[in-house]
Image (cartoon, rainbow, N blue to C red):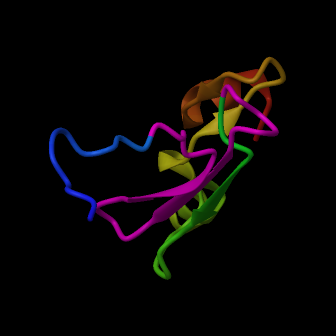
Amino acid sequence: MKESRGRPVINDTPILKYTQVFEDEDGGKQIWIYDKTINPFGPLSVEMKYPKEYKSFEDEQKELPKTKRKYCTKKGKWVGYSRAKVLGLI
C-alpha cells in the first residue's frame, strides 16, 4: 500500500505554446500567439481585431471640413490647413 505523505510532486515542465488575449475598452481585441520552440524571445504572431464601429485615420479626415484636416508633408510631418496651403500641399 502506497501512502501519500510529504510535499506533493511539482510539475516543472515549462509551457512552450500558449495564447494571450487582450481586450481594449473600445471593444478591440489583440490575440498574441507564442511558441517558445520556434521563437524563445517573443510572439510568433499578433492578430488585431477592430470593433465594428472602428474608423481609420483617413476615414476620420474625410469627414472633417478642409480647415480642420491634417495634411502630410513630403518629410512625413503632419501640418494644419494654413501651413499646408503655404507649402502648396492643397
Residue situated in front as seen by the camera: 39 or 83 = 39
Q: Give, as a single range, the part of the protein colored magenta.
A: 12-41
Residue situated in front as seen by the camera: 64 or 10 = 10
Residue situated in front as seen by the camera: 9 or 86 = 9
Q: Residue furthest front?
A: 1
The residue located at (76%, 26%) in the rendering is 73
Residue 59, located in which quarter of the rendered image? Answer: bottom right
Q: Residue furthest left?
A: 5
State which quarter of the image contains the N terminus. bottom left
x%, y% of residue 30? 52, 58
x%, y% of residue 24? 35, 59
x%, y% of residue 53? 46, 79
Q: Is residue 18 magenta?
A: yes
Q: Is residue 71 magenta?
A: no
State which quarter of the image contains the C terminus. top right
The residue located at (53%, 62%) in the rendering is 60
43 to the left or right of 30: right
x%, y% of residue 88? 80, 29
67 to the left or right of 33: left
